[in-house]
Amino acid sequence: LLNSIDGKKDLILDKELICSLDYIANFSQLKTCHVEKIFKLEPGSAPGGTNKCVYLIKPTIQNTKIIADHINASKSIDSPKRFWIINVPRKFLMFLGLVPSALACLFLFCLLSSSHLIMLTACCLVPSWKILVFRISCSPLPVLLIAFASETLLEREGVYGYAKQMELPLGFWCLDKDVFSLELPDFMNSFYLRGDLTHVHTAAMALAQLCRICGPIPKILGHGKCSKMVIDLMNLILKESSSHSGGSDRISHLIILDRDIDYVSVFLSQLTYEGMLDEFFGINSGRILFPKEVTGKDEKLKVILNSSDVVFNEIRNNYFASVFGLLRDKAKELQSKEQQTKSTLSSMNIGDIKKFVSEEMKNVRQQHTSLSVHIGACEVILNTKTEENFQDRLRIEHDILEGQNLRECVTYVEDCINKQDPYPSALRLMCLLSISQDGLLSSEYESLATQFRQSYGCKYVSTLYKLNKLGILVEQAPLYHLVLQGGIPIEEEGVNLKKPTDMSYVFGGSYAPLIGRITEQVNVERKFYFRK
């Protein structure tokens, strides 16, 4: 896409895509496409530089409005700029309404060209406007009209036609050798709260692209409303596509599960090392920013967390309590390697020494640096856990799962709120209480919600409303407590946390992630559902 734009150009990035840019192309690759400078998308006027501005954005209304302001500001200067908008993964859709099929035909031909309109008839995506017209004319059903919101907004701002719209359907991002992600953090809000199907299409397109590369997937299992929609749409896209697949059954099974079948795993404290890093520092697109408390330097350190980091790869999935011992063993191993190196260098010639220093010594130095960073991260996490009485929290989470000492659990949550612990921490315990009991008692719900608003402010009223709408933080149905039998099923058998053989170790042996357990059982029993 960048090469299709002649000459030197500036690239303006959506802040949500900055961290992920390296997965698309690094700066040296962008330079070969004549990109002069890279800017972050911000309100105001268009950034200075060349007279060609290329925006790489997530297609939100906010981003489109900022670009429209840039274009309007550019009109007033002597040498106006030229603009291109690359939408990742596609242009944003906006619901226009349900209209009779006859009016839809008129709307199609009189108002919009086929490239600006997508229609859904009887909940089925129609990829071709010619087929669309046939279906409309033959069906008395109302038709759902959807227009591209970004183009509608640009037209309203008086800049439609000043920017060329393009799409970049990236599909899956390779975060690690065995981890692929769509990097759609808004999927949850979009689908489950707003009922927006945009990301469903994105997921189906990505899976269809995977099938074209690796061949058809013979065995497919899905559970949940969203999973069914993705599978059906993927099959429709593959059926309509004329391209041939790149292989035969290179992927044997596909399992798609809705997030809402296991909210418990989201609200429990993560106890693996990688989980702890996410809890305390936050992991974004496979990257983490370590503060000066970890590095001992004034500047934050950005680290890529994947299997190329030898030290991290050895400890990432271990229970946190055992990580210090593993790091100590790794330090001894590197020290031993250094001693062997000193004795080996004396017997080498110049060529061997040069090769050894450029390869082996470089690898050892990288591991030394990584080891120092991860030791620092462990120390910060351990100190914070001690200050926050982390063991008390784990005990409360375990009691909530077992459905015991609930009055004490509610008191602990109230204390967290009144001490103004970080609001996500208190909110997660409230949600866990609600899910484990299929809702809170009315008195408890009102009390916790009121205390939460008073402690953290009314700006989180919308958060409480959304959690209630999702069925996560709700009041218990009348008389339900009379028939409720305990809490969420937990793992009864003891789990070896140092050498675990069961996935429940990620939560200290008290709970196994339901999505992981389903996948495990499907793999063991080899029972799959087929979708034609």
Image: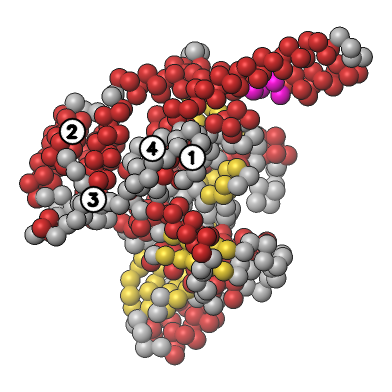
Question: Which residue carries the number 4 mark?
Answer: 508
SS label for mark 3: loop
Magenta stretch secondary structure, dominant: helix
Question: Which residue carries the number 2 mark?
Answer: 412
Compared to residue 7, the image places residue 328 above or below, namely above
Inspect the image, locate mark 2, and give the three-letter code of the amino acid beneath it: Tyr
- The residue located at (39%, 72%) in the rendering is 145
* Mark closest to the chain's N terminus, 2 or 3: 2
Camera-nearest label, 4 or 1: 1
Question: Which residue carries the number 3 mark?
Answer: 487
Q: Residues within 10 Å of mark 3 (few under 14, many from 20)?
A: some
- The residue located at (76%, 22%) in the rendering is 360
Inspect the image, locate mark 4, and give the three-letter code of the amino acid beneath it: Gly
Inspect the image, locate mark 3, and give the three-letter code of the amino acid beneath it: Gly
- The residue located at (56%, 59%) in the rendering is 206
The x and y percentages for residue 401 are: 27, 45
Give the quarter of the image for residue 219.
Answer: bottom right
Camera-nearest label, 2 or 3: 3
The CA span between labels 2 and 3 is 18 Å
Question: Which residue carries the number 1 mark?
Answer: 500
User: Does 169 sit left or right of 187 as displayed?
Assistant: right
Q: Which residues are magenta?
A: 363-367
Camera-nearest label, 1 or 3: 1
In this rendered view, identify the residue nearer to me: 26 or 437. 437
Compared to residue 506, the image places residue 352 above or below, namely above
The quadrant of the picture occupied by the C terminus is: bottom right
Give the quarter of the image for residue 38.
Answer: top right
The CA span between labels 1 and 2 is 30 Å
- The residue located at (55%, 22%) in the rendering is 327
* Mark closest to the chain's N terminus, 4 or 1: 1
The answer to whether residue 271 is seen in the rendering is yes
